[in-house]
Amino acid sequence: MTVHRRAEHPKRVLIVCQLDGFANSVRPLGIQQFLRDLGHDVSVVDTYGLSRASDAPGSLGWKLPGSLRPSKLALYANEAASKLWTRGWSFGRRHLSYYVLMTDYRLRRSILTSSLPLDDFDLVICHTPYDAGVLSSATSARTFYDCPTPWADEAFFEGRLTDRQRKKFRRTESKLLEQVDHLSFSWESYARYAVEHYGISGRNLTQLNWGCTPSADRARFRDPPRVAYLGSLSSQFIDVPLLARLSARYPHIDVYGGPPPDPRLGLNYRGYASPDVLRQYQFGLVTCSQDLLRQEGFSAKHLHYLAHGLPVLVPAWRRYLDLLHGSVTYTEETFLSVIGGLSEEGAWQSVSDQAYEQARQLAWEETLRPLENLLA
């Protein structure tokens, strides 16, 4: 492992993020710890409940506006409009989401720009596309957009934009991607996608791949092999119906995450759990849609699985798996035979060792190394 020296001239860093308890929490907190270990002064602003009286979903405060300030009331009203117009109404989802998303983006930029002392920091990092407009504000701080995925195309493939709206959204997003001082994506294949399909220059790319913390307690072989799915169940690109069909084929699949799925899907849903639960399993499962963005994309849960030495079952349409050793591809038709091919301990152990070694190479202290040089 790389030995990192404490900074001779510590910097002040602001991280703007949404700590939702899932993948959106893992990366900013990993960066916070990495930079603090180097001696930098790091502040974190959680915008998950920016318009609410509480950031705890399900609480009374979550249902109430957090301020009488006009911009925050407008943000609260926009979120209510999104729920009313774009959740269960297919026409509204396709045709009205653009206006809700852009309103959210502009209001958040206004609120954060006026409330955060940006000039007090040497570097401002933003991890969410919803809040990334704050990076276009005039400030003496350097700006770093740690973009999860190309946002316009994600919204389009989720059925939330028309073709025309996608083009307008891309122009807005591309302007920001070019404007920030430093740009990264959650995985390098998304960076290639943005350069190729958005036409951005990539001149400001400082790529930070997703990282992990390899578990000291690795998974062990058991028969029959048990499969874990760990992560969000809320987006269309996850393809929960595919997860349900695979569960119908193989009864030893346990599902963790949220929100709770429709009981009619027949999933063996186990609620929320920390990644430590993975040591009880023999495979980690990734499901995703087949659109171009997800073909070239990445799933944060993939690293959780590798960190516990789990061979990762990945749809055959996902590309660039040469970057993630320990991955095993499947289709619906081959799913059972793929598991069967690794149901002998020696074969399973070999792939498990590949997975764990890959996790060691993708430890946070390795993937975040460019930040050390950037702040030197």
Image (spheres, grey):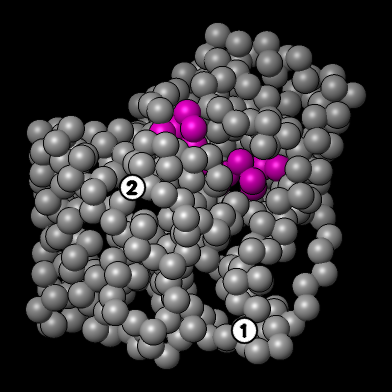
Label 1 sits on residue: 40
Q: Residue at x 67, y 42 (%)?
A: 305
Q: CA distance from mark 1 to mark 2?
A: 30 Å
Q: Nearer the viewer, residue 19 or 366?
A: 366
> Residue 319's spot in the image, x, y percent?
56, 28
Q: Nearer the viewer, residue 134 or 308?
A: 134
Which stretch appears magenta?
293-306
Q: Is residue 280 visible?
A: no
User: How many numbered circles does the render carry?
Assistant: 2
Could you tell me the amino acid type at mark 2? Trp
Dot 2: element:
helix
> Residue 286's spot in the image, x, y percent?
55, 33
Relative side of 336 to 22, left or right? right
Q: Is residue 302 magenta?
A: yes
Looking at the image, residue 69 lies above or below residue 336: below
Looking at the image, residue 356 lies above or below residue 40: above
- Magenta span: chief secondary structure: helix
Q: Residue at x 11, y 55 (%)?
A: 81
- View extreme (right): residue: 346
Q: Is residue 36 magenta?
A: no
| Mark 1 surroundings: few (<14), some (14-19) or many (≥20) residues within 10 A | many
Dot 1: element:
loop
Label 2 sits on residue: 151
Could you tell me the amino acid type at mark 1? His
Q: Is residue 1 visible?
A: yes
Relative side of 273 to 123, left or right? right
